[in-house]
Each structure stands twice: as C-alpha cells, then as structure tokens.
Amino acid sequence: MPSVTERTERAGTATTSLEELYRRHVDDALALGFLLTGDRALAEDLVQDAFVRVLGRFHDLRSRDAFWWYLRRTIVNLANSHFRRRRVERAWLERQRPDPAAPPGPDLEERDRLLAALATLRPEQRAAVVLRYLEDLSEADVADALGRPVGTVKSMVSRGMDRLREELGEDA
C-alpha cells in the first residue's frame, strides 16, 4: 500500500498535469466554442462545462495525449445540445402563441368598465357577486364563504346584478 507521502506526491502530480492541460488547451477550446456559437459568453460557459466533464473522467483516459480530442468532442456535443434545447424551446413558444384567426381576448376597456361597476357595489354584495359568478361557486358555497343564509346570498346577488345592469347597461 502506498504511503501518505507517495499518495500526496501523485495527487500533486495529477493536479499539476491538470493545470498544465487546462493552460495548454483553454485558448483553442475558447476559439472553438466561439466559432461554434458566435457568442463569447456562451462559448466560455460551454468550455468550462467541457473541462469539468473531461477532467472528471481524466483518470479514465487511456492516453493523456487524447485529452484535446475528448475536450473538442465534448465542446461540440455541448454546443449541439444547447442549440437543440433552444430549438425545442422556440417550438414550444410558437405553439403557445395565439392563433391570429382566433377572436381577440377580453377587451381591456370592457374589463375596466366591469371593475368600475363592481366598485359601486357594497362590499358584501361585491363579494357575493364575485364568488357566485366569477369564481363560479354555488349559492350554498357562497353562503358558507360569507357566513350568511342562502336566502340572503340570493338577495344580495340579485340586487348586486341589478345594480351592475344599471351601471353597465342592459347589453352587458
């Protein structure tokens, strides 16, 4: 079994050779990364990830002379993965866009009119109307939420809706 001194010397040699490999290949790796991506920051990120991956397997390399080949292949693979992810993200975003032939969403002016009309209601009426129609709760659920009898909730909703019709007009 190797002594502590021998293991420390080997670890120091490995560290030195790792540093040497980094210094020897970092400029070429950055140039390759930049040529593949056209983005300096992205190239730096890819090269850093590539060094971490290859150096993590450094002890598994059969030939230390093949380090550059492994590093180059890893940079190319990481760049390809990056652009593949971007294609998938863009395709997903494209699918999320609304169909131009589809009717437009809610009118902002109409929404503002509705909010202003709701603000004219007494707070308990507003709560009853919002819970009943905008939250789609049953009259019993609204009554439970407000702590009122069902008959009172029906009356509050009816009077609130009458008031909204006055504010918004019959067509609303």
Image: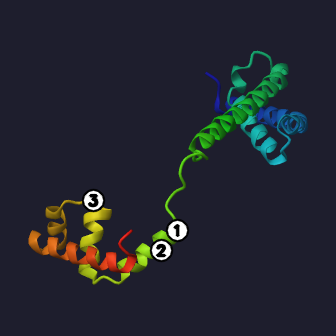
**Contact between labelled residues 1 and 2, with CB atoms less than 8 Å apart:** yes
Numbered badge on residue 59: none
Say whether residue 149 is left or right of residue 18: left
Query: At 29% across and 64% down in the image, what residue appears?
Result: 133
Residue corresponding to mark 3: 136
Residue corresponding to mark 1: 108
SS class of the residue under badge 1? helix
Q: Tag 2: residue type?
A: Asp
Q: CA distance from mark 2 to mark 1?
A: 6 Å
Q: Position of residue 24 (x, y in %)?
A: 89, 34
Query: At 19% across and 68% down in the image, what residue appears?
Result: 145
Numbered badge on residue 112: 2
Label 3 crowd (10 A; few <14 / some 14-19 / many >=20): few
Q: Please say whether residue 15 is visible from this viewpoint.
A: yes
Q: Tag 3: residue type?
A: Asp
Q: Position of residue 53 (x, y in %)?
A: 69, 32
Return the residue found at the far front.
170
Residue 119 drawn above or below residue 153: below
> Quarter-wise, where is residue 47 in the image?
top right
Query: At 33% across and 80% down in the image, what residue appears?
Result: 166
The disc, 3 or 1, on the residue closer to the chain's N-terminal end is 1
